[in-house]
Image (cartoon, rainbow, N blue to C red):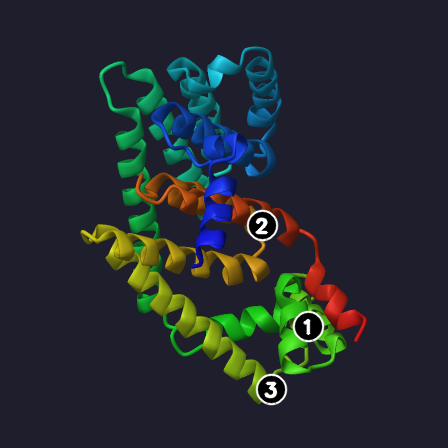
Amino acid sequence: MSSESRSLWQCISTHPVLDQLSGRDSHQFLAVVSALSLGILIFHGFQHVYFAIPFQLLVMAWLVVPSLRQAGPYWFIVFLFSAASLWLTWTNADNHKYLLCYWVFALFLAFDSKDLDKTEFLRRSARYLLFFTMIMAVVQKTLAADYLDGSFFEFILMTDSRFSALAALLTGMDPALFAENREIYLRAMDPMLADQATGTLHSSAQLHSLAMAITWINYLDQIVIALVLLLPLSRRGEIAKHLLLMAFIVPVYAVAPVIGFGWLIIVWGYCLVPDSAPWLRLGYLGLFLLLCIYEFPWLSLFVYTA
């Protein structure tokens, strides 16, 4: 890097706003982490009415009294409503909702204790939550009969409307074939029509190859991330670890419609950034915004305007 480029970067990275967002000291770090966590709860939190309405009141209380964001009792109340929402919807709640509830509980423990090193506790909580998320995903995929052979993702690509645009774009298949696949699948799943359901799902060699690529890239990436989370690393190793995690987030949540899960992983990644490389936190904040853009059905533009 030239001296001019280095000077420009130093000027940008020490800008008061960016300096605060990078969490260079403990107070800034806790403020950003709590704010991002609230953002997840507001936009991709627990949708049950027993949580949604009280949480709206809690958010308004935080807007009036910003210090509540770092108050233990405040996060304990959020945790109680989160746990109640999960208990009432446990049969169909997404896995990452449980992880979000665990994270809320960790925030309560961190902010409620006067003797605890809040920053270090949240970093450890983020590390172990992220590790177990990755390693349990690997275990589940290894034991599943339909994952490593590509069957799982091939079926998802064929029948799930959230992935149809990606599949059509990368394989060249007619989008109408994916609409027909969904119709066949929905008829087969309907108890009233199951006996009359006929038809074969449309696939192709290109679709199978795409499914295999997604399967193994996702599988191997999660193994490596899980391993490096527990290893003592040099500064360069830490930077490489975070770049690997970012490289996992960017493609996965471009097509996976679980933005709240992606945001949660981003918050954990933000927590794990070493103090020697605070600029990496700005990268995670950029990913937070990128996932907002991902919520727009941008892949459909490429498919249906081709």
| Tally of numbered tags | 3
Provide the secondary structure element on which disc 2 rests: helix
Residue 94 visible? The answer is no
At 35% from the left and 61% from the top, the residue drawn is 222
For mark 1, what is the residue?
A: 184
Q: Is residue 198 left or right of residue 216?
A: right
> Looking at the figure, which quarter contains the N terminus?
bottom left
Residue 194 badge: none
> Looking at the figure, which quarter contains the C terminus?
bottom right
Residue count near mark 1 (Cα–Cα under 10 Å), binned few <14, some 14–19, many ≥20 = some
Label 1–label 3 contact, CB within 8 A: no
Q: Earlier in the sequence, mark 2 or mark 1?
A: 1
* Mark 1: amino acid: Ile
Q: Looking at the image, is mark 2 or mark 3 nearer the viewer? A: 2
For mark 3, what is the residue?
A: 204
Residue 291 badge: 2
Residue 259 position in % (x across, y down):
56, 48
Label 2 and label 1: CA atoms lie apart by 32 Å
At 34% from the left and 29% from the top, the residue drawn is 106
Residue 183 position in % (x across, y down):
71, 69
Label 2–label 1 contact, CB within 8 A: no
Q: Is residue 129 above or below residue 121?
A: below
Q: Quadrant of residue 2?
A: bottom left
